[in-house]
Amino acid sequence: MFDVSPFLGHDLARVWALASKKLTSIEIGYIPSVAVTEMLSPNLGPHQSPIHIQPSMLLSIQKLCLSVDCITDAMVSTISKGLVSLTHLDLRDAPHSEPGIAQDLTNFGLQQINQYGRLKHLSLVRRQEFLITYFRRVNDLGVLLMADNCTNMESIYLGGFCRVTDTGFKTILHSCSRLYKLRVFQGTQLTDLVFHDISATSLTLTHVSLIFCNRLTNLAVRNLVSNKDLRVLDLRNCKNLGDKALQAIGILPQLKILLLDNTDITDVGLSYLRQGVMCSLVTLSIRGCRRLTDKCISALFDGSCKTELRELDLSDIPNLSDKGVLLLARSRVPFSELRMRCCPLIGDTAVMALASMQVNEDRWYGSSLKLLDLFDCGGITQLAFRWLKKPYFPRLRWLGVTGCVNRNLVDALARSKPFLHVECDGEELGADQWDCSDGSYVHDYDEVHDYDEVDELEQWLLEGEGEHVDEEMGDEVDELEQWLLEGEGEHVDEVMGDAENNAELVI
């Protein structure tokens, strides 16, 4: 890992001339497309290099992942001709200005891909970091030409192909019989017709992402779920999807990740997931689904099925309140990640409920959470910070809060918990996994999160603090009961609308 900027131009070819013969993978965070062409063809262009890249290095490269200024025909052609063993190609760009025809990807460039027939994984994505732009010079013809060379492809990710219609996407589905992972980002021309006869293909899709495909409706999902082996389904920002789509998804027996951000689902729709797919789901995101209310929690968790859910995103749901979080705490689901950012009705009561929640008779309160995002929750005050300190949330690694609530408290909390990363400026926690710009955050369900440091709970025990923590915890639980009895409890009664003792309910 190093910065390539000092070596741009023909000097970059000199660097790669020293590369190990065993090098099989190259990943560069940013490099100009011209430099890529010179790197792989140092004998071309005005700056001819006296040192050529060792042919053995070019022969061994199997995986190439690059982020460039602009994906061009020349770059794609050079990569396809020069890297004869390439099986994995991942190219992303983010142009600062609208590319001219000589600095853009066209149908001709797509035709050059996979000339040696070894490519298994292809990703071509145009991001909109600096301006709204697409691959405007690629249409269905380009995809048809590419598909002729890609019959053995197993994974395809296309982002920003605004002129490719159902015809082009159907060609991929019907030509690539080994395809198991399909991802489309900003498929503005993609409609239900692309999946109309998918059951007639031999495809066994396990990962499908259709992000910002706003012309899709519930019918597309009903046809798509004929692939019963689906494990990852990402339908974020498909705004025309509603409860009937959830009814179809509910029958998938192996689904692990379901992302439904900004769709038109309701509390009733989520109840369709409870008896089926909720028993297998590990990750669920319903961020920005503005028709949801507190009832969505009881719709998902009623105790009738043992769930494997560990990651839940409830962010940007305006009608989600402390009442919903109290119900969530009562469910005792051992979440490791819980996101509730930008929920104006979430407040201190929610934090107290999570801090006091016990899982599987574990005496360590709030022990399962490793990530908690409460940024811009309207009801969070200084009181909540009492419940974020020891002995609560002993395994918490990432915490998102609004820094302006009380900066001193935020800093004091960070000092008291050296294992905790506190973000208070609105950053997405774990951004590598949760990149909402193009869906690249979606990780395989069997990946293990790395929370970096030693488990804080184990560290306390090793340092002999267990007895002190027990005593402190007892004091704090008494404080919760006292708080409930001294007036704040009336508010919880009102919120819960339940005759049960609130201390029992929360703890």
Image (spheres, grey):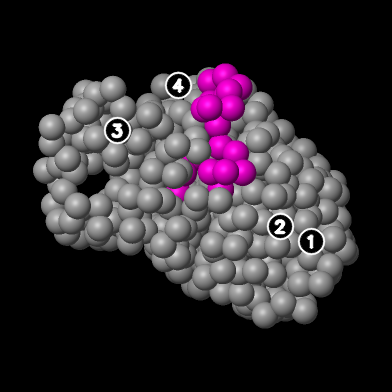
Q: x, y (%) of residue 323? A: 74, 49
First along the sequence among labels 4 and 1: 1
User: Badge 2: few (under 14), some or many (20 or more) residues near its Cα, within 10 Å?
Assistant: many
User: Badge 3: few (under 14), some or many (20 or more) residues near its Cα, within 10 Å?
Assistant: few
Q: Secondary structure at mark 2?
A: helix
Who's the residue at 19% across and 43% down the image? 53
Amino acid under label 4? Arg
Who's the residue at 59% across and 55% down the image? 146
First along the sequence among labels 2 and 3: 3
Q: Is residue 334 above or below residue 380?
A: below
| 3D distance between C-alphas at marks 3 and 1 | 42 Å
**Residue that carries the numbered disc 3 in the rendered image:** 44
**Residue that carries the numbered disc 2 in the rendered image:** 169
One can see residue 503 in this view: no
**Residue that carries the numbered disc 4 in the rendered image:** 407
Q: Secondary structure at mark 1?
A: helix
